[in-house]
Image: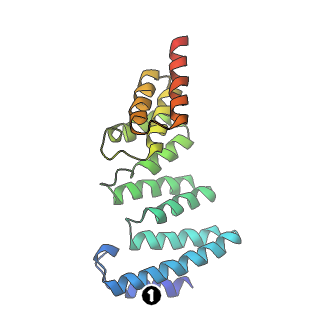
Amino acid sequence: MRTSIIALLMLIPWSGTAQNATSESLNILDAARDRMSRQNDAWYRTGEFLPIIQSQEILVAVNPKDEETWDVLIWMYQNVEMPDLQWTATRRFASANPSYIDAKYYEANFMFAKKLYAKIPALLEPLISQSPPPDPNAFRFLAHSYNRMGYYEDALRVWDVYIKIKPKDLQAIANRKGVAEKMKKQ
């Protein structure tokens, strides 16, 4: 199955990315991706995670801009407990998508899960003032990281920026209040 999909993908005439492909090529790519997705579902149900990873690696090679495919690949590396490859995939995604505002999200998510809070501000701080703003989780990772490191003023600042963007986010408002209460106790 994998050999035939690889052969099919190699026949598609394009110069590196799906954006340069012809309409016919895109139809072939969509059909191959749909078939791979159905096969991945079958493998997932039977616990065969490594073929899913191989399939996703093919898809990111074909279209490195496809965030959904990267998301599945990164998640699958986590499922099979391969943190080195998971980390590498987060870095590859960011490298393949340098102008995408949420490109650093997967790295930050990885670091947050590993409790590497001190590394998160360098990734996310430059993004929170951009327009359009990054994913809400970028603000959450950053504010929670500052909070856990004891940098309460920075945590409040990040919550304030986020709450200006999403004033009805009740959890963010509660988180901000919790940080403010910690500051009062100091």
Residue 40 in the image, given as x and y percentages of width and height = 60, 73
Q: Decide: few, some or many residues near mark 1? Use Cα within 10 Å; few <14, some 14-19, many ≥20.
A: few
Horizontal and vertical percent for residue 19? 30, 73
Asked if residue 132 lies left or right of residue 81, the reply is: left
Which residue position is annotated with label 1?
8
164 w.r.t. 11: above or below? above
* Residue 80 x %, y %: 63, 59
Q: Secondary structure at mark 1?
A: helix
Q: What residue lies at 50% left-to-right and 46% top-to-bottom?
A: 109
Q: Is residue 42 above or below residue 98?
A: below
| Residue drawn at point x = 31 percent, y = 55 percent | 98
Q: Is residue 186 visible?
A: no
| Left or right relative to 175: residue 15 | left
Q: Would residue 121 be seen by someone viewing this image from the given angle? A: yes
Q: Considering only vertical position in the picture, is 161 above or below 98?
A: above
Residue drawn 55% across and 12% down?
A: 185
| Res. 9 image quadrant | bottom left
Total count of labels:
1
Q: Position of residue 8 (x, y in %)?
A: 44, 87
Q: Is residue 23 above or below residue 74?
A: below
Q: Residue furthest right?
A: 46
User: What's the coloring here?
Assistant: rainbow
Residue 133 in the figure: left or right of residue 137: left
- State the residue in front, 31 or 150: 31
> Residue 45 falls in which quadrant of the image?
bottom right
Q: Point out the residue furthest to the front here.
A: 168
Amino acid type, callout 1: Leu
Work out which quarter of the rendered image holds the N terminus and state it. Answer: bottom right
User: Between residues 23 and 13, which one lies in front from this camera angle?
Assistant: 23
